[in-house]
Each structure stands twice: as C-alpha cells, then as structure tokens.
Amino acid sequence: MTGPRSGVAAEEFRRLLTGLLEPVAIVPSDDHQRYLVDERRRIRADAWAVVRPGSTEQVAAVMELCAGHDVAVVPQGGNTGLCGGSVPQPGSSRPTLVLSTSRLNRIRDLNPVRATATVEAGVTIQAVQEAAAGADLLFGPDWGARGTAQIGGAISTNAGGLNVIRWGGLRRQVLGLEVVLPDGRVWDGLRPLYKDSSGVDLKQLFIGAEGTLGVVTAAVVALQARPADHHSALVALPDIDTLLPFFTHVRGRANELLSGFELLPAEGIARAVADVPSLQAPTLAAARWYALVRYSGDDGTDDRVAQALTDVLAAAADRSLITDAVVAATPVQEQNLWYLREELPSGRRFDERGRRHKFDIAVPVDMIPPFIRRADTVVDQVVPGVRTYIFGHVGDGNLHFSLYPGPDADLDRFDDAGAELVSAVDRLTWEFGGSISAEHGIGQEMRARLVGQKSDLEFELLARLKNTLDPQGIMNPGKVLPESWDRPVHEVRSGPTAQRS
C-alpha cells in the first residue's frame, strides 16, 4: 500500500509545516531522537519531522499536508508500546513524519450523571483515573505505565491491564471517538451513548488499529461507580492444576466483587523483592505458583467485602484448593501486594546477559494450566534446558510469557534458535485456540508472525479496509498487516481463493 514517493524535499516540507503550526508544535531536530526510539530501545529510525499539534484542527492540517505530499505519518502517544508500533520503520526510504499527541492533553468534559469523560488522545491513563476519582467515579483500565501511557495509544492497541476481569479492556470503555482520517477530514463520533443500534459501529474500526487507519484525537470513555473498599489476598496454590478450581470458586462465590485475579510465579516474587528494596514479600507457605485476588465493593457497616474474601478463602482451604493465604490488613499492605505484581520482572532479569524471548499471549481461560504444562515440554524439545517464566491476568486468559536459558542450557544454541523457539510457542498458542497478541498489539515486530493466526479471507478484509480508508498507505506504514498483504487495492485478490504472496 505504498503510493508514489514524495515530490517535495525535506527542507521544503519542514518549511510548509512552519506555516501550519506554531513553534512549540514543531520539535527541533536535535530533540527528535526520543521520538524515534521505542520503549525497549531496540528499534531506532529516522523521520523528516516530529510535530506535536495542540488541537484536532492542527492534526487535520498536518494530515492534509502529508497526504498532499505522500509523506507517511506515524501517530505516537506515550511511546510505551512493546512491539514497535509507535516509531517509524528502520531503514525505510519513505518520507515520514512522527505525530505526537502529547499536547492533546485536555479533559474536555466529565459528566457524573452520564458517568462519562470526554478526553483528548494525549491525556494519560492516570490523569483519567484521577479525574474520575474526583467525581467519585472510576476509570477501569489500569497497568504499570499508567502515568506515561496515553489514552489514544491505549485505544489504538486495545490495551487491557489488571482490571479487565471486572471492567473490561479499552474496547469496552470507548463510547465514542474523534478521528482525523488520512486525507485530513475529521470524523466526529464523540457520542456519549451506551446504546446505539443505528448501523455499523464505526469507532470499533479504529480501536486496536494501531494508527493504521487514522489518528484518534479524542474519545468518550465510560466511567464506573467507584468501589469504596478493596481487599486483597496473596494465596499459595498446591500446584498449577488447582488454579482453575480456585478461580471458579472465587468468582462463583462473589462474582460481583471480584476485580482482580493474577497468577504469580514464585521466582518472579523472589526476584522482585530482591530488586526493589521497598517491596515486602508476605510470609507464606512455599509454592511454585501464587494467586493475587482482589475484591472491590461498597464499604457497608458489616464490612461485607472483607468478610466475603475471608469466607471464600476459608472455604477454598477446606477444599484443599489453597495451602496458605495472607490478607492485606491495611491500605499500605494492600498497595504492597499490587506493587509486588507490577514489579514482577521480565524474563530478561533471570539471565546475566538478558537473553530471553518475550510473548504476550491469550488463551481461553480453561486452557491456562494445560498450556503452561505443554509449554515447558515444547520449548525443551527445541533447546534443552530452556526455562519458561509466566505470569498474567487469569480472568481474561492473558499470559505474559518469557523464555530464558536455564543453567544447563546450551547458550549458543539458545542464541541461534530464536526463530525456532518463537515459532514453536506461536504454534502451541494457536493449538490452544489462542492469540499471539493479547494486549500489546502487533506493531512492526509481530506482523510477520500474524500470518499463521488468521485466514486469507480475514487478511483480505483487513487489507480492503486499509485500502479504503488509506489508499495512499501513509498511515503508520509497516505495522499490523503482514507484508504480503500490505499492498495496493488492485493487488488484493477477491474471493476465498486469495493467496498470500
């Protein structure tokens, strides 16, 4: 999906930008680098210009200029993504502009009666949470990068986080969107409606599209009643096979209260405590696997939430679903338990050279234990001695999964077998009916791997949608769609016999 190359020189293009934007909106060239490197500092690229528009109208003007000169646009929020979706492709000869949404940072409206907030794309997740709390409401999505991640980027990757089990991911939070299309036109879909059956829900096209169809500039998001009381417990499991019986027990006894259920490995807890002096590990019976459970609800005179959690844990112990549990008795202890979860290390910190392979997968919830058991066997068949390190969100089947070399592994073989290991895990994920991307998106790093997950017909539909909205292919090129499907509309073959090139 690439059109003719730009007919304008870089300097002339930058001069045209200065006619559209005030100086503060144009990032000086000596400050470009931080916009051109991804969060993990693995991808570095170049761009003709980096801009920070301060309004939807300015975004529209920039998009119209870029479309007129066939300059690619890479939308960028907080640049906290882990798949290279918010930075340009390295080595691309195509003229490229990075469009940062950081100055689109206003909360336009917060309506307590509607329980909605209208926020611009550059507002951070934490800022939305704090604004909601000020109205005694709650914005459900939450994860460790809350202070940096921006709502526009979160929408573009359909981010999830710790509270999906109770309030859902971004797709469930978004009621309306404002989007600047590739040609500079603005679609105003900022409707604060919880129910609207007036045709195709266009906003869903842009949620999870990673900026390949347009630039999200604002959103109406749903807010929730703010629970007055939270109680959490860290629980030792006898083995991984008791995870699902315990989860269904916890969910079934008080489903309306359950707001968090996380799987934590013992080695992750030990490393987090060793690396972060402020963390404290509760004294618990030794186990390989632990679960972190949180109940949230109203604070009644009978302390219903705390009692419900205590009762459910006692019943679980009676059924031998758990071997031990520690319940947070104070807000400080509650906070410590969840900091412990947020500080779980990546697999990189288990090897002196930081060798690892990282996965962000989703499988059906009931497939989590069998997947974990099979994963150990599958990767060991590729490279004997490889260790698996897994934690994640049990309630939605999202596992953060890393491979690193154990003490008996052949390190040279581990270094050389990266593609084999990744392919083996991807095949296993699909065998269990899963997805290779749960909440981190596809970006540029995973687009080739996506070929094994979707049918040709699905790719054809996605390619036709891309070509319809972005016929020049200027929106975040080289992301999401595999290269074999990222081509002009006349090359996308119709019908069920469409083949990958």
Image: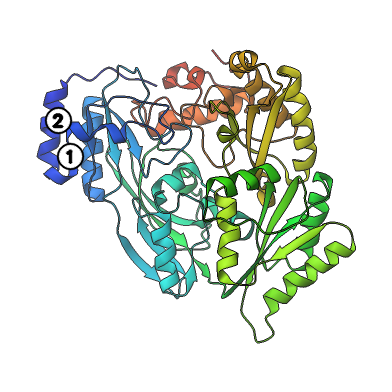
State whether residue 485 is above or below residue 21: above
Q: Name the image quarter holding the C terminus.
A: top right
- Residue occupying image coordinates x 83% and y 50%: 238
Q: How is the image coloured?
A: rainbow
Mark number displayed over residue 14: 2
**Residue 487: quadrant of the picture:** top left
Tally of numbered discs:
2
Three-letter amino acid code of the residue under disc 1: Ile
State whether residue 148 is above or below residue 419: below
Residue situated in front as seen by the camera: 164 or 467: 164
Question: From the viewer's perspective, is 190 left or right of 461?
Answer: left
Q: Earlier in the sequence, mark 2 or mark 1?
A: 2
Mark 2 neighbour class, 10 Å CA radius: few under 14, some 14 to 19, many 20 or more: some
Q: Position of residue 170 (x, y in %)?
A: 51, 52
Mark 1 neighbour class, 10 Å CA radius: few under 14, some 14 to 19, many 20 or more: some
Which residue bears the numbered disc 1?
A: 26
CB of mark 2 within 8 Å of CB of mark 1? yes
